Amino acid sequence: MRLIFFGTGSFALPALRALSEHVVLVVTQPDRPSGRGLKLQPSPAKLLAGELGIPCETPEKSRAPEFVEKLEALEADALVVASYGQILSQRVLDSAKKGGINLHGSILPQYRGAAPIQRCVQNGDSETGVTLMQMDKGMDTGDIIEIARLPINPEETYGQLQDRLALVAAQLAIDWMPRIVGGDYPRAPQDNSLATTAPKIEKAEAELHLSGDARTEYNRFRAFTPSPGCYLKTSLGTLKLADVRFAPEAPGAAPGDVISASPELTIAFSRGSLILREVQPEGKKRMSGRDLANGARLRAGTCLAIT
């Protein structure tokens, strides 16, 4: 097999590693500013391509004619796409004999779009999966080849679930790419009437609200951890949230009330409560919720809501 691999994020890495002996080129997003110094950082896929000794291209626009000509010259059997971050043009898809084969982190046609894993966690789903699909020029609208399903742990974060789904995607790639290249594979059209979307994450969505339902806010925390990372605005300042757990409702508590400060810091929401197990206050290092409570002399009944 001669494959060109399009991928950027960590979801793509197990599949790239699994197919590496057949990959003649890795295509990924350009280096982007990251971290406090906003230094240019290569994508995870670019780093792995270097480790594996595979040539790598980072076009700003994959549809640029001069880049498409490079793809066509490679005469690949197929393009394998996982967490790439750009919609591929029809000419790009046509540059390989079997077109583009996408590993998408949802059970299509549910959660078409940029953030399928985050959105299913945010919505409190109990099941997700990886869809292997034949790409067309639409947004995750192509024919389905295979779906592998996976249950979601009720306390699992996006990062943890993504790691498990990435291994599922790699196994799908190993099992199916030889058959696809050989032309021996099924294709089933999607039922567009069942389609839902998964738009990209906006940073403002990562704020938890004391006025919200605790289960909804807990799912928000799970969906946006570790990236972009959740936070809670309180009378103590903004707390970055590293580890949070759901807790039952405390009768009579108002949103923002400290239900308990020890052995763990538990805060009431409009319905239910959350245990803040690990937080980072403004200008300070990460600490346990209990240490925060001790340092701020919090006790049951203290209200952290901003008035």
Image (tube, helix red, strand yellow):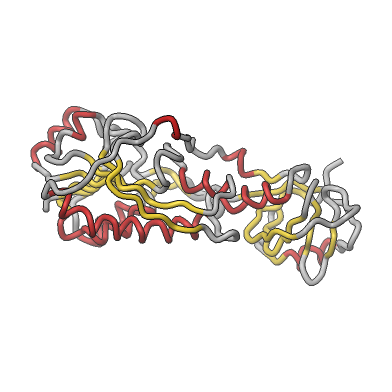
Identify which residue, 267 or 168, lies in the foreground.
168
Residue at 78% across, 61% down: 266
- Image position of 91 with respect to 52: above or below: above
Q: Residue furthest bottom?
A: 263
Identify which residue, 75 or 129, lies in the foreground.
129
Residue at 43% across, 30% down: 193
> In the drawing, does residue 60 fall left or right of residue 260?
left
| Image location of residue 166, percent across then percent down | 38, 57
Residue at 88% across, 53% down: 253
Identify which residue, 10 or 161, lies in the foreground.
161
Quadrant position of the C terminus in the picture:
top right
- Image position of 129 with respect to 300: above or below: above
> In the drawing, does residue 132 fall left or right of residue 231?
left
Report the number of discs. 0
Residue at 45% across, 40% down: 110
- Image position of 285 with respect to 39: above or below: below
| Image location of residue 219, percent across then percent down | 62, 50
| Image location of residue 265, percent across then percent down | 78, 63
| Image location of residue 109, percent across then percent down | 41, 38
Identify which residue, 127 or 298, lies in the foreground.
127
Quadrant of the rendered image containing residue 63: top left
